[in-house]
Amino acid sequence: MEITLDHEKLVYCGRIDQRNPKKPEWVFPATSLQFCFWGHEAKIVVTNRHKYWDNRVGAIVDGVQKQWLLNETGETEITLVKEERNRRHKILFFKRMDSCHELVLEHLFLSDGSLLLDPLPVAKRRIEVYGDSVSAGEVSEAIDYVGKVDPEHNGEYSNSWYSYAWMTARKLNAQLHDVAQGGIPLMHGTGWVEEPIFIGMEEMWDKVHYYPNLATPTTWDFSKYTPHVVIVAIGQNDSHPQDFMKYDSDGEMAKKWKAHYGTFIQQIREKYPKAVIILTTTILEHDKSWDDAIEEVCQNLNDSRIRHFLYTRNGSGTSGHIRIPEADEMSDELVDFIQNLDIPVWED
């Protein structure tokens, strides 16, 4: 039996293109679909828009994590669960990766005679993250490389479930919109995204689709989701191709970056007047001058609900991407910081 993908008992989370609610399109990591049913089999059919790397999706099925490799193009049929006898199942199907691909949900099938059950309660707390590959959970599963440079890979180690962003949200029992893209800087013309275009967060932050050649760019409707906490983890990729902040923190490029960063944070504030906005980077190695620049902007903004946060090993924890234990460490520190703020956090 087919379940329409706009069924009221299906619970979505993430910044999703729902212009056609019967065929939702997923762009960002940690985007998810959760449902409960009585039956013995569930399948989902998706269409992949491939950009680079092998593309995998994930699910938590009755408490067990699974993953599937997608066809580069066209449809892929995924058997989420298949058993002999009917029983209750809880499924969280999610996007493991960033815009190395986009995903269109086409069909959801349950075994004949199945019953779609009432969903679990939706978390009332809401978090939004603006970040790069670390926020997306890129290469997080390469646990043999804790504290080391990345191994050679083709995307198989990337998993948003193990990003510090989603770990933080789970520990705080909060929903998450993870607006993260590997290689993204703040400003255009730097970073690692789509050479020679070099897309910046300034271009991406208010979009659903944003990656060239995957889909026509679309603007996000901010009224659909209002976070209590916004985490801005940007400032590590702007050092490519030139680490101008390190070599001349008072130079013209540095001044320009700080001005753009301040404007970006003010744009977020305009969208979310009551949110707590946390400015930070990560434990991935980078020059301290970037965090000093963020602190300077934070002070100049003079907003009691905008705070600058540094991890214990900020900018010095690892030369490679953040692995699962390191993301766990980061999320513990971030949760502690949020829980001990001297201002109300979770009030609507």
Image (spheres, helix red, strand yellow):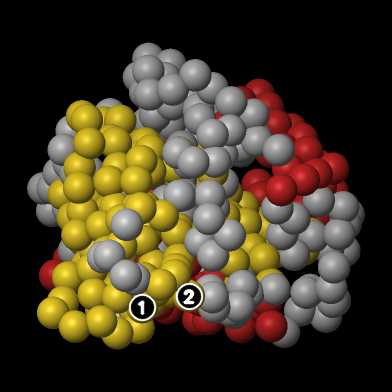
Residue positioned 59% across, 26% down in the render: 218
Q: Secondary structure at mark 2?
A: strand
Mark number displayed over residue 294 = none
Residue beneath disc 1: 38
Is there CB contact under 8 Å for labels 2 and 1? yes
* Amino acid on which disc 2 is placed: Leu
Vertical relation: 21 (above or below) 50? below
Looking at the image, residue 107 sits to the left or right of residue 144; the answer is right
- Find residue 111 and report its horizontal and vertical position in percent: 26, 65
Residue positioned 54% across, 41% down in the render: 21
Q: Depth check: give the residue in front, 73 or 214.
A: 73
Q: How many marks?
A: 2
Picture quadrant where residue 85 is located: bottom left
Q: Depth check: give the residue in front, 174 or 140.
A: 174
- Gap in Å between the C-alphas at discs 2 and 1? 7 Å
Q: Secondary structure at mark 1?
A: strand
Name the residue at the top extreme: 196
Looking at the image, residue 257 sits to the left or right of residue 319; the answer is right
Residue beneath disc 2: 117
Would you say residue 82 is visible in this rendering? yes
Residue positioned 39% across, 67% down in the render: 92
- Find residue 160 and report its horizontal and vertical position in percent: 37, 59
Picture quadrant where residue 320 is located: bottom left
* Amino acid on which disc 1 is placed: Trp
Vertical relation: 208 (above or below) 282? above
Would you say residue 295 is visible in this rendering? no
> Which quadrant would the C terminus be assigned to in this image?
bottom right
Disc with the residue nearer the chain's start (2 vs 1): 1
Looking at the image, residue 264 sits to the left or right of residue 137; the answer is right
Circle 2: is it few (<14), some (14-19), or many (20+) Cα within 10 Å? some
Residue positioned 32% across, 70% down in the render: 113
- Find residue 131 and report its horizontal and vertical position in percent: 51, 49
